[in-house]
Image (spheres, grey):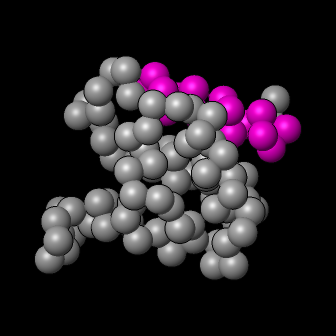
Amino acid sequence: MAQRTASGNWSAKVTRKSIALELEEGVFTWQDPKRIAHLLKRSADTSTRRKVPPFRSAMSMLMFYINRAGKNLDENQKRILEQAKDELRALYGKG
């Protein structure tokens, strides 16, 4: 059974209070995939708390959000976040 926190689901807490990355409020609701990717890259590159390389840290946070939102994620927003993954790969030269 999933553990719940006082403020709701543990996954919501992880998204809000990532140990590795500091993210702006609502980053995953933005409509610009390039902007999302650039923020994730900037956060990952400057983080002193991450335990994996910056690309992996940024991509993991994005994938975590997409996977936890699941079927509750609006199709248009899911498409934007999938594009943000491509933008992130391009920013890190991961073809």
Q: Residue 89 is drawn in which quadrant? A: top right
Question: Residue 5, image x and y in percent?
Answer: 19, 74
Q: Residue at x 33, y 21 (%)?
A: 75
Main secondary-structure element of the magenta-colored stretch: helix
**26 left or right of 43?**
left
**2 left or right of 47?**
left
Name the residue furthest right: 93
**6 left or right of 42?**
left
Question: Residue 45, image x and y in percent?
Answer: 74, 63
In this rendering, is residue 15 above or below 48? above
Question: Residue 80, image x and y in percent?
Answer: 48, 27
- Quadrant including the C terminus: top right
81 within the magenta span: yes
- Quadrant including the N terminus: bottom left
Q: Residue at x 42, y 44 (%)?
A: 28
Q: Residue 90 is drawn in which quadrant? A: top right
Q: Which residues are magenta?
A: 78-93
Frontmost residue, 38 versus 7? 38
Q: Residue at x 69, y 52 (%)?
A: 41
42 within the magenta span: no
